[in-house]
Amino acid sequence: MTGDLPPENWSTDNESPRGVWGPKEDAMRRSRFSEEQIVGVLKEHEAGADLAPLCRRHGISAQTFYRWKQKYGGLESGARGG
């Protein structure tokens, strides 16, 4: 019975078809926001903007905001310090 075997393009390691989503290293997404835009959002909050409306306006979650704050909080004028 030939129905017992998986198709030739079926991967055995992760049980998903090969080539559908491309190589695993291509799985990392690029940000929709540049570093300058992220710093701008953080500066809006520093200037006194409430978090919930700020996140809604920019289409981000509070978790994303706090992740950006941790990563980019010390940036000045878009230049990343070492």
Image (cartoon, rainbow, N blue to C red):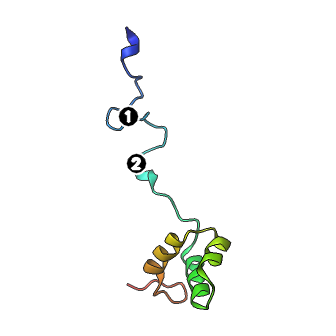
Q: Where is residue 35 in the image (x, y as percent from the top left)?
A: 54, 76
Q: Distance between the residues labelled 2 and 1?
A: 14 Å
Answer few, some or many: residues within 10 Å of disc 2's Cα (few below 14, many 20 plus, some between 14 and 19): few
What is the residue that sits farthest to the left in this orientation? 13
User: In terms of sequence position, does the residue under pointer 2 or pointer 1 come before the other?
Assistant: 1
Could you tell me which quadrant the C terminus lies in?
Answer: bottom left
Residue 67 appears left or right of 41: left
Which numbered mark, 2 or 1, is in the foreground of this view? 1
Query: On the image, numbered disc 2 is attached to which residue?
Result: 24
The answer to the question of whether label 2 and label 1 lie on touching residues, with beta carbons closer than 8 A, is no
Residue in the picture at 37% in, 32% down: 11
Residue in the picture at 59% in, 85% down: 45
What is the residue that sits farthest to the right in this orientation? 57
Q: Where is residue 12 in the image (x, y as percent from the top left)?
A: 33, 32
Residue in the picture at 57% in, 73% down: 34
> In the rendered image of this protein, does residue 49 appear above or below residue 19?
below
Q: Nearer the viewer, residue 59 or 53?
A: 53
Q: What residue type is labelled 1?
A: Glu
SS for callout 2? helix
Q: Position of residue 42 (x, y in %)?
A: 56, 83
Query: On the image, numbered disc 1 is attached to which residue?
Result: 15
